[in-house]
Image (cartoon, helix red, strand yellow):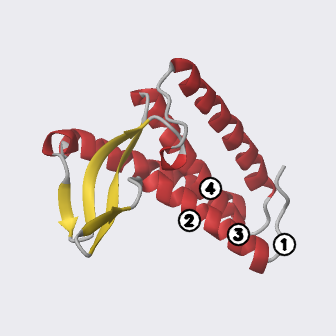
């Protein structure tokens, strides 16, 4: 399999897994009706609508802000796709595919719902205080994994094509 095919496959698998998980949680499991669901002592399923960007930054539900975020995301996906097409290492190409698939998955949410569907919450209790991580989804996991793999590849891997 060529690096480009591997990257495209990573993007497609990421996109399908992300959208399937969200559709199942919203329409079959009905997370909105159930509320928070404790899965383990440190992990809950919760429904959160993120109208901002990563980690809830830039929270703004105006249509102009949402369109601006979509435009920036579209430009980023195109730039990443060009980089992926020029990449020569499987690791970098798959990493870019993960980022592209995650970005498209969250973009679909923004178009369909006006916000990104987040549902995974890790937390820990220490001395009676509960500390929560940010609520996230599978697209976010893929994006973070892709960025980590790109960093690894850029510092320790074979030199790859430069970003456009």
Decide which of tag 1 and tag 2 comes sooner along the chain. 2
Could you tell me which residue is drawn at 84 percent across and 62 percent down? 161
Q: Residues within 10 Å of mark 4 (few under 14, many from 20)?
A: many
For label 2, the residue is 145
- Of the residues tagged 3 and 1, which is closer to the observer? 3
- Residue 36: x and y in percent read 20, 51
- Residue 138: x and y in percent read 43, 55
Q: Quadrant of the N terminus?
A: bottom right
Comparing 5 with 48, the one in front is 48
Could you tell me which residue is drawn at 58 percent across and 19 percent down? 64
Q: Residues within 10 Å of mark 1 (few under 14, many from 20)?
A: few
Tag shown at residue 159: 1
Could you tell me which residue is drawn at 50 percent across and 29 percent down? 60
The quadrant holding residue 114 is: top left
For label 4, the residue is 97
Mark 2 and mark 4: Cα distance apart in space = 11 Å
Tag 3–tag 4 contact (CB < 8 Å)? no
Decide which of tag 3 and tag 2 comes sooner along the chain. 2
Tag shown at residue 151: 3
Q: Residues within 10 Å of mark 2 (few under 14, many from 20)?
A: some
153 left or right of 117 in image: right
Decide which of tag 2 and tag 4 comes sooner along the chain. 4
Mark 3 and mark 4: Cα distance apart in space = 14 Å
Could you tell me which residue is drawn at 78 percent across and 60 percent down? 87
């Amino acid at each position: 399999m060529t690096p480009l095919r591997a990257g495209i496959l990573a993007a497609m698998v990421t996109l399908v897994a992300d959208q399937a998980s969200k559709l199942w949680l919203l329409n079959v499991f009905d997370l909105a009706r159930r509320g928070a669901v404790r899965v383990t002592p440190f992990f809950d399923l919760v429904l959160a609508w993120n109208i901002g960007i990563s980690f809830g930054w830039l929270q703004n539900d105006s249509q102009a802000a949402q369109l601006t975020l979509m435009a920036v995301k579209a430009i980023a996906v195109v730039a990443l796709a060009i980089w992926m097409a020029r990449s020569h290492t499987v690791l970098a190409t798959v990493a870019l595919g993960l980022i592209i698939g995650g970005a498209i998955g969250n973009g679909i949410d923004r178009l369909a719902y006006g916000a990104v569907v987040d549902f995974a919450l890790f937390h820990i209790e220490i001395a009676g205080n509960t500390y929560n991580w940010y609520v996230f989804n599978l697209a976010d996991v893929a994006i973070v994994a892709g960025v980590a793999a790109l960093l690894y590849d850029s510092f320790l891997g074979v030199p790859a094509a430069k970003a456009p």
